[in-house]
Amino acid sequence: MEMLAAWMGEHYFRTFLPSDGDSAPFDVVLNQRDRRVGITIGGLGVEGGQPAADSVEELLTSDVEVGSYALWVPPAAEIPADEPELSAFRVRIANGMRGLEVNERREVRLPAKLLLAKTDIDGQYVSVTGELSTHWTRISEGVDGAFHLDSRALHRLPEEGAELDILISRVRDRAALLNEGERTDVDVHDYWLVSRLPGDEPAGVTSVGAPTEFNPSDGASIRRLLREHIGRAAEQRQASECDFSVLLLVAAFGHMEDEMVTVALRGMNPASYSTVDLIALVTDGRVREILQPRSLPWA
């Protein structure tokens, strides 16, 4: 909610403050002077959360400085629950959060092992499963033979192109050392994201993640959830007066560019969301406008 209020303030050059009164029937109400902004909050697969989320949030909250932080768990990734993995994870994430300024994001490197096998001496090809599958042509450049790379240990690729180049080069370098029928581990990093939220409430660390079985690229599932949340937002708008209505969606996409919500909305009948003024998506430590308001009460 703090991220949405800050984004709206920067976007509309207005100040939006949480209401002290009863927010019902909305989930949250923001005030812009004497105007009432009713907000419906809907999760896209994040309701089940991660089994170890509560315990790691408590541990990280005791580690970080005063402030409000978010840990964005990538799709299919899992927060470790057992030792020594939990302690190592805690140290790396806490170090990544230290020194963050308000609204700042940072990638945290977590160790990961890929599995690479040489299947044939002929060809110049690397078949890839997992997060690196879209980069198989780049990985195949310059290799001698046919290989298979299992990159399912990676859940989020780096945002910087130079970091991705290093990762791909490491795979190629290991491939050059293999003989037919041999396999090897490739030590790389998974790039999780942490961010510092606007304001200091809620204090501590909040994790945003989906159960490992949730598939954020499943368009049918995203459309179904979106329809449900739009229907609830319309019901809340009809049940109470407000000057501006917002549907805030929270998701655990690896990168904002991976979001499927915009495409899902385009495939819907506009009449179904005509009572909602703004639809915004929060994921990957950022806010994106999915539905632009037709008019603004403060314009």
Image (cartoon, helix red, strand yellow):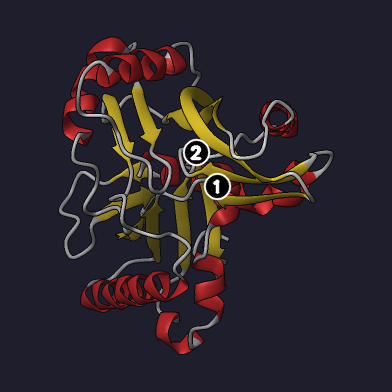
Q: Secondary structure at mark 1?
A: helix
Q: Are marks 1 and 2 in contact (CB under 8 Å)?
A: yes
Q: Position of residue 99 (x, y in %)?
A: 48, 11
Assess disc 2: are there few (<14), some (14-19) or many (≥20) residues with their C-alpha within 10 Å of its C-alpha.
many
Q: Which image quarter holds the N terminus? A: top left
Q: Position of residue 168 (x, y in %)?
A: 70, 34
Instruction: State the separation of the CA atoms marked 1 and 2.
Output: 6 Å
Q: Judge from the rendering whether residue 93 lies leftward or rightward of residue 118; answer left or right.
A: left
Considering depth in this image, is 250 or 101 the residue closer to the camera? 250
Q: Secondary structure at mark 2?
A: loop
* Residue 14 visible in the snapshot: no
Assess disc 1: are there few (<14), some (14-19) or many (≥20) residues with their C-alpha within 10 Å of its C-alpha.
some
Name the mark on residue 131. Answer: 1
Question: Based on the displayed image, in which of its 4 quarters is residue 205 positioned?
Answer: top left
Q: Earlier in the sequence, mark 1 or mark 2?
A: 1
* Residue 274 visible in the snapshot: yes
Residue 87 vertical placement versus 283 (above, below): above
Under mark 1, the amino acid is Glu
Residue 95 vertical placement versus 240 (above, below): above
**Residue at (23, 26) in percent of width and height:** 56
Residue 226 vertical placement versus 169 (above, below): below
| Residue wearing tag 2 | 154
